Amino acid sequence: MSVRRVMPDIRSEAIEESRDFYGLLGFEEVMDHGWVVTLASPSNPTAQVTFMTHDKTAPVVPDMSVEVDDVDAAYALIQENGAEIVHPLQDEEWGVRRFFVRDPNGRVVNVLSHR
């Protein structure tokens, strides 16, 4: 299993202002679903930051997202090691398969693969 990208997820009620602010640093919008917006560097597209008002299907906003090449293998490994699953593995309508897990620091990690 390999990691494709890692990005912070920031809970925000100021998504538009955040888009404008991070635009000053060179980030451009690459996704906008209304409740979640992702910005990326045009010169390094895996350098990203996400702002969310809430999560559409999960009970919490994650602290970070990790995209892996095989989310099913990651889910099995996490379960085998007894970590707390916060949101079960499922396919989402916006084209990802994902689950949330709590890390040893109490942070919620969104682990995903694109379908």
Image (cartoon, rainbow, N blue to C red):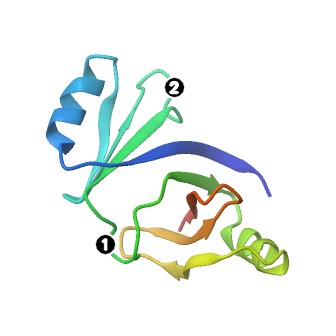
| Quadrant housing the N terminus | bottom right
Outermost residue toward the front in this view: 105
Which numbered disc flags the more N-terminal residue, 2 or 1?
A: 2
Q: Amino acid at mark 2?
A: Asn
Q: Amino acid at mark 1?
A: Lys
Q: Is 20 or 41 nearer to us in this picture? A: 20
Marks 2 and 1 sit apart, C-alpha to C-alpha, by 28 Å
Say whether residue 66 is left or right of residue 82.
left
Q: Which secondary structure, mark 1?
A: loop
Q: Is 42 or 102 nearer to us in this picture? A: 102
> Looking at the picture, does residue 13 appear above or below residue 115?
above
User: Circle 1 is placed at which residue position?
Assistant: 56
Say whether residue 108 is left or right of residue 23.
right
Q: Nearer the viewer, mark 2 or mark 1?
A: 1
Picture coordinates of residue 73, whole percent (x, y): 77, 72
Picture coordinates of residue 96, whole percent (x, y): 48, 67
Please tell me which residue is depicted at 59% across the width and 44% down the height of the picture.
Answer: 6
Please tell me which residue is depicted at 58% across the width and 59% down the height of the picture.
Answer: 109
Q: Is 79 or 105 nearer to us in this picture? A: 105
Please tell me which residue is depicted at 23% across the width and 34% down the height of the picture.
Answer: 19
Quarter location, residue 107: bottom right
Picture coordinates of residue 89, whole percent (x, y): 58, 80
Label disc, if present, on residue 44 of the rendered structure: 2
Picture coordinates of residue 56, whole percent (x, y): 31, 72
